[in-house]
Image (cartoon, grey):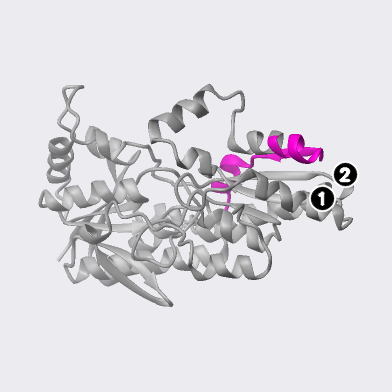
Amino acid sequence: MKRRIGILTAGGDCPGLNAAIRGVARASYHLFDADIIGIRGGYRGLIEGDYHRMEESDFSNILTRGGTILGTSRTPFSQMRDNDDGVDKVDEMKRNCRAMKLDCLVCLGGNGTHKTANLLSEEGLNVIGLPKTIDNDIAGTDYTFGFHTAVEIATDVIDRIHTTAASHGRCMVIELMGNKAGWLTLYAGMAGGADVILLPEIPYDINKVAEVVETRANLNKSFSIIAVAEGAMSQDEKAMKRKEREQARTESVYNSISQRIAAEIEELCGVETRTVVPGHIQRGGTPCAYDRVLSTEFGVHAAQLIRDEIYGVTVAVDGRKIIHNKLSDIAGVPKLVQVDGPMVQTARDINISLGI
């Protein structure tokens, strides 16, 4: 029996999306008679009916390509039920799924994507999720695809900054992505030999950070490396209400958390300090070998679920076993760095400061 499978990629791009798309398609063609319908531009394309039937040749030579051949967009979950623009987005998505005659909709994305996928599942559609995000913050899976590539890129940035920091005797503050979860900064900071790692989950004391820089200077270590997640906050900020914190940052003379920390370090320690913000470089380029394999495994497992008519789930990895979880169990449940978790303890045991 032929199965018609819709595929979309939503939210921020990351390495491994094309490898996962390829995994779904190639396994589907192998396991059963399949038509693959590509939906352009994420949920926006599903709302607007922007889709096309794909050919087997479309999935050749994309394993190593970064980004997504389907395009992506951010359509916040909070707007899915917002009909102020006169469009019932949920009804439009359901209508277009019926128009495409889909047997299953495969949604590749992060937390917001999975919340919408669960919504569509609750509305009666056959949906399967594939977890991608460089933040690695989706519940129920050890890793999301895209994360390890971003860690390698961020680690390379730290490695390169080491040489210029040592040459000039500077303190370098490297701001990495991660608004709510600090997994990327924690892994890259440890891999890159950072002296201080600041995470959203562990509010920092700038005086403790300054102590590390001063102690290293007193030991004739001419430079310090501080890896900070973009969502890191001081203990004073943590005590504020969210709107107060957002307003304070909006009114700040500093454009980023790294700029503020650098200025504070210079004032407290008298040490020349510079900032580095690699930004979207962390999302770009070809996926690493690990992410190519993981994305392929996720895609193949999704095709197996379609064959077995198991829907309302998202694929995950537990150890080295590929599994699946109910969308309703993981949607909207962020996986954050645990303050007393093993990775944090490892960092502490090798004398990396967490700013506390």
Q: Which region shows up in magenta?
A: 264-286
Kind of residue at badge 2: His
Residue in the image at 43% along x and 36% along y: 240
**Residue 283 is a magenta residue:** yes
Circle 2: element type: helix
Among numbered discs 1 and 2, the one appearing first in the sequence: 2
**Label 1 with label 2: CB-CB less than 8 Å:** yes
Which quadrant does the C terminus fall into? bottom right
Q: Label 1: which residue?
A: 223
Q: Is residue 26 visible?
A: no
Residue in the image at 64% along x and 62% along y: 190
Image disc number at residue 351: none
Rendered location of residue 1, percent (x, y): 14, 66
Circle 1: element type: loop
Q: Is residue 235 left or right of residue 171?
A: left
Rendered location of residue 328, percent (x, y): 20, 58
Give whichever of 249, 110 is nearer the camera: 249
Q: How far is mark 1 from mark 2, CA to CA?
A: 8 Å
Q: Is residue 301 visible?
A: yes
